[in-house]
Amino acid sequence: MGDAPALKLWNNKKEQEKYENLADLYAIVKTTEKLERAYVRDVISAKDYEPLCEKLIAQFRTLWETLRTEVPDVQAFMAEYNMQCPMAAKRLIYSGLPATVEHGKPNTYQANSAVAVAQTVSDFITVMDSLKLGMKAVDEIFPLLRDLMNHLNLVTQLPANFSAKEKTKKWYTDLHTKPASYTISAEEERQMTYDMESSYNEFMSWLQEKRPG
């Protein structure tokens, strides 16, 4: 008796690409869950964890952009395939930040306070200028907020509950859940502009207080 014919999941190139993308999404979620658990258990250092997590988050965002029609709800996708990955869901779907950044545990091996401060000031100005120039799409604003969030995290002297950092993180995580084509409303633009300006002023005031003499 001959071997049973292989099950074919697709009938054309488009369907094949869809199933391959779904397989990639499954793999990214599973890999992120393993990485998160390894970090929590101290199996991997912050130095190694952070770039790996950032790469997985970036891959997830890129892939999900192409799958939003087929997979509008990643949590439902995970439930359908019985994926017990709560830590990956938090990191990929809701936070969009490595734990080292989200919880204020910076990757101090690469932190240089003077450089980080200068980069943070520059990032604040870039975000504010971009909003003034009318940039409203997520794919225009989100990368700027990501740079700002990463550099704020490297200013190791900042208090853990520094409100400028919390406001930036809130906008980052809000936009992380939106598609690249999403355009912020006039109300959102006004609030973000206010939050960025007040955060910039707060950061500059903090620098003045830290300045000797």
Image (spheres, grey):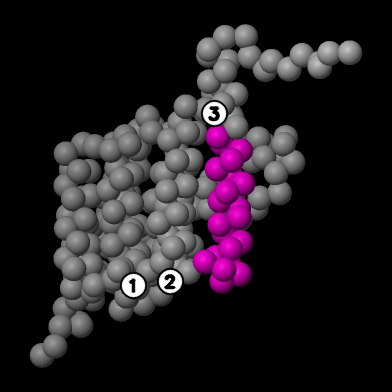
Secondary structure, mark 2, is loop
Q: In x, y percent, where is residue 36? A: 57, 59
Pointers 2 and 1 in contact (C-beta within 8 Å): no
Can residue 142 be seen? yes
Which is nearer the eye, 186 or 114?
A: 114
Residue position for label 1: 109
Farthest-out residue, front: 1
The answer to whether residue 146 is left or right of residue 7 is left
Using the numbered discs, state the Cα–Cα distance from disc 2 to disc 3 in whole angstroms: 33 Å
Using the numbered discs, state the Cα–Cα distance from disc 2 to disc 1 in whole angstroms: 11 Å
- Which segment did they paint magenta? 24-44
Q: Label 2 amino acid?
A: Lys
Q: Earlier in the sequence, mark 2 or mark 3?
A: 3
Disc 2 crowd rating (10 Å Cα; few below 14, some 14-19, many 20+) is some
Secondary structure, mark 3, is helix
| Residue at point 53%, 53% (across, down) | 91
Q: Nearer the viewer, mark 2 or mark 3?
A: 3
Farthest-out residue, right: 1
Label disc, if present, on residue 191 of the rendered structure? none
Pointers 1 and 3 in contact (C-beta within 8 Å): no
Q: Label 1 amino acid?
A: Tyr
Residue position for label 2: 105
Q: Earlier in the sequence, mark 1 or mark 3?
A: 3
Disc 3 crowd rating (10 Å Cα; few below 14, some 14-19, many 20+) is some
Label disc, if present, on residue 21 of the rendered structure? 3
Which is nearer the eye, 23 or 134?
A: 23
The answer to whether residue 95 is left or right of residue 118 is right
Disc 1 crowd rating (10 Å Cα; few below 14, some 14-19, many 20+) is few
Number of callouts = 3
Secondary structure, mark 1, is helix
